[in-house]
Amino acid sequence: MDKYSWAWFHRFASPPYVYRVAGLLAPWFAWAAALSIAAGLYGGLWSSPPDYQQGDGFRIIYIHVPSAYLSMMCYGLMAVASAVGLIWRLKLAHAVAVAAAPLGASFTFLALITGSLWGKPMWGTYWVWDARLTSELILLFLYLGFIALNNAYEDPRSGDRAGAVLALVGVVNLPIIHYSVVWWNSLHQGSTKFFGDSAQMATSMVVPLLAMILGITLLFAACLAKRLQAELLARESSASWAEEAAR
Amino acid sequence: MSSLHEFLTMGGYAAYVWPSYAIALVVIGFNVAAPLKRLRRLKSEIRRRGGRA
């Protein structure tokens, strides 16, 4: 029984199987993302009312919050994959972490740049070295460090392990980002309650925001699936399944 | 939004709102295109090598 379940697990985690499943899922994620983002943009940029304090400037929220959310979610995913790779020596898990890192870096960059463009009219400055902004910048450096470290070794397995250790050490930054607005006096506003009687945001604004968060997350999933496919093909380019896949 | 004019000018915030979305479009476009391009390149490399062997 035990033997059987491990055989099942190895088939499930085998590169050709994951390559095929990722290829099948990616277009579904992409189409669902397109629909959700279209609805979110319509609601967010057109049909929702201007904010009573920030006018139409608040509409940056519909790209800023999904980017910031993904920048952290992707790091969590990368760290879990790294841990699985280190503990169970699962090459597939390292491939997932390597595929996720550039996407995480790109969304961290987007969160920083859109936050900066939002900060200028509302705070009067593009940048301030406060806890939320600085810890998010450190997140970007963690992603870039992971990518650099991963590529720094002749032996890809050493790169995988070194990157994974960095990813795990960097996890400490996630709660710092999240609670930075509580622990320190920050220019950045605190968390906003979306639901319930004490909701701090109007439904007409929350619904498009949720659609954008869902849409960008689905888009991330589609991109991750394609990146993982490429990563697996590159790592196993001499395997017979790769030759079949390349046909 | 009450008018197309308000939409385009973003009630005076156009210089901050539209660049945010433009940069997002570029970054997301790159995220979509980069893995597709890499997959195509890898596949053609593998095919070439297979043909020689």
Image: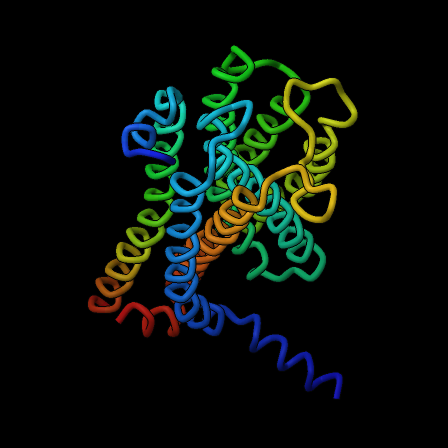
Which residue sits furthest top?
Answer: A124
Relative to A125, is A178 on the left or the right? right
Name the residue located 32 percent from the left edge and 74 percent from the top edge: A244
Q: Quadrant of the N terminus of chain A?
A: bottom right
- Image location of residue A7, percent across then percent down: 63, 81
Name the residue located 55 percent from the left edge and 33 percent from the top edge: A145
Asked whether residue A172 appears in the rendered view, the answer is yes
Q: Is residue B40 above or below residue A132?
A: below
Which residue sits furthest bottom?
Answer: A1
Q: Nearer the viewer, residue A3 or B39?
A: B39
Which residue sits furthest right?
Answer: A183
Relative to A38, is A224 on the left or the right? right
Q: Is residue A229 above or below residue A220?
A: below
- Image location of residue A226, percent across then percent down: 40, 58
- Image location of residue A245, percent across then percent down: 33, 71
Q: Quadrant of the C terminus of chain A?
A: bottom left
Q: Is residue A94 above or below residue B2?
A: below
- Image location of residue A139, percent across then percent down: 60, 32
Asked whether residue A148 appears in the rendered view, the answer is no
Q: Nearer the viewer, residue A24 or A185?
A: A185
Name the residue located 69 percent from the left edge and 52 percent from the top edge: A83
Q: Nearer the viewer, residue B11 or A126?
A: B11
Q: How is the image coloured?
A: rainbow
Q: How many marks?
A: 0
Q: Quadrant of residue B50?
A: bottom left
Q: Is residue A37 above or below residue A117?
A: below
